Image: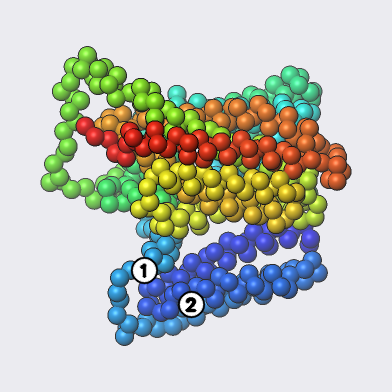
Amino acid sequence: MKDLYVVLVGLSVIFYIFFVLGTARLAIQKKLNSILLTALAALLPIIVIYFFLNEENAFIIILLALAIPLAAFLFTIFTKENKSKVIGKVSFFDNIVMELTQPFIDLSKTSQALFGINLSYVLEGLTYFGVVGLLAIFFNEYIKLDDIDAGRMVGILTAGITIAMLFLGATVDWIGLRKSLLIALSLMLVGRIILTISPSIGVSGLWNSAHIYAMLGIFGIVLGYGIYQPACYAGVKQLTDEKTSAMGYAMLYALMNLGGFLPGIISPPIRKAFEITGVFWVYVILTVAGIAAVYFIITKKAMTKALADLNTDKNKVEEVDPMLEMSGKEKFMYYIKNFPLKDLRFLYFVFILIFVQTLFAHNWLTIPLYTSRAFEGFVGENFEFFVNLNPILIFILTPMVTALTSKKDTYNMMIAGTFVMAFPTFILALGPTFETLMAYLIIMTIGEAMWQPRFLQWVAEIAPKNMTGIYMGIGQFPWFLTKVITSLYSGWFLMNYCPADTPISELNTETMWFIYGLIAIISPIGLLLAKGWMKKGFKVKHVD
């Protein structure tokens, strides 16, 4: 029963979020006291767990705590609308709640084809995050690589996907959405099968047969994912119009984060019973389920109906693309004139972020091994749960932080956001405890929510017409470098400061995280020191 605690905790988190947000949304719609009801539903369970939870009564206390938001949810369902209340200006709280919940409301109204994409995306998000969180440990324990080489293998997967999307992203334009998704998922299926069976069909060790087979498996996943993610976003664009596109992308984002959280619930009990290869076989089955979802839901008939049902404005005057009238030479000169590499401020702004972005890479390069080696009890035994907390936190915190900071200066927000993200790394330098780990995960996620969406929006908005793709590509290039660079040194730090098969008292994780904090803090310091120079020519939008 103890091994299933993480399942209980994970499902309780999901139901807790559902009941709290459901209470808030219904209270707003029925003109009840939404803030009071939401506060009771959200805070009372936390108080109950904090004061009464212990190992002996965990099951009962968690269920009792969950009963509170359930009661609040049922109360709002059966309470009649307060028709006497006059609706005034929509509050900040109401905006946040509606933005958080709307994607899931919209999910029930989507076309069959778009629903198929979303279902596939949840399954693939679950599978991808589940595999990548265990990959370094898999190479340690089954392929018998040291931490340095295991980190490099994870870097090959994550950085390889970025490169693959650059070269294979156009596949959906050539062969269509359905075929692209089926080919992509089939490649990932073959890759995951080869990866899973590699220890049993080969000889372990660096560059021995098991290692080669595992790399072939990674290659299949890289090729498949390079086609898959661009195809999903292209599918949303194809199956939505101007009125529904924002909803479509928000839905995909929300479901991706939900899928990213689920491995933390599924993986621990399966790993304890059947080891990591058993978990990988479950992800193989989920990949098959993803293929079935695409094959049986995104049918040609469903695609035809979805496209026919789109509300297109036949009287809309299409915008004329001025580049169509340009000669080849004029187009070339236009690109040269507006090419982002000529802008030193743009380059500095993009590349200075590499240092804080290393913390993203540590989510799968360092955190899984750190939590499994430096912690005992619930955290060490169920490290996947904590590795995969970031997606669900991002889902909750991003709309809140965005609403609070949307009118703030972009550059100042980048300084503040990167600082808030980098700072909690020094909290981990205080030592491996549950409190420092949770503080790091929550505060780092707040920082990420402060700057990451603003950065992507800024890159898109300063791009000249017809050059958004180039600007976004160069804006993402440092992220590719981060994956590569971090994977080259993370294993060395683990071997020296958090080695395997070492008593926790003899580990020196404090030094490791202190150094990582010094690396990450370079970004906000660099942005702050260059503020005077950057602000002189800092663009907010492209000006023709």
Report x, y in % for residue 35.
Answer: 46, 74
Quadrant for the C terminus, please.
top left
Residue 330: which disc? none
Q: Secondary structure at mark 1?
A: loop
Three-letter code for the amino acid on which mark 1 is drawn: Ser
At horizontal 47% and vertical 43% (from top left) the residue drawn is 415
At horizontal 42% and vertical 62% (from top left) the residue drawn is 96
Three-letter code for the amino acid on which mark 2 is drawn: Leu
Report x, y in % for residue 239.
Answer: 33, 45
Q: Nearer the viewer, residue 210 or 394?
A: 394
Report x, y in % for residue 309.
Answer: 27, 50
Q: Secondary structure at mark 2?
A: helix
Q: Is residue 44 visible?
A: yes
At horizontal 62% and vertical 72% (from top left) the residue drawn is 45
Report x, y in % for residue 226.
Answer: 49, 30
Q: In the rendered view, would you say 512 is above or below 387?
A: above
Q: Nearer the viewer, residue 109 or 296?
A: 109
Q: Give the side of residue 531 with respect to residue 388, left or right.
A: left
- The residue beneath circle 2 is 36
At horizontal 35% and vertical 22% (from top left) the residue drawn is 342
Q: Residues within 10 Å of mark 1 (few under 14, many from 20)?
A: few
Q: Is residue 114 visible?
A: no
Q: Residues within 10 Å of mark 2 (few under 14, many from 20)?
A: few
Comes first in the chain, label 2 or label 1: 2
- The residue beneath circle 1 is 91
Marks 2 and 1 sit apart, C-alpha to C-alpha, by 14 Å
Q: In the rendered view, would you say 509 is above or below 486?
A: below
Q: Give the side of residue 22 with respect to residue 517, left or right.
A: left
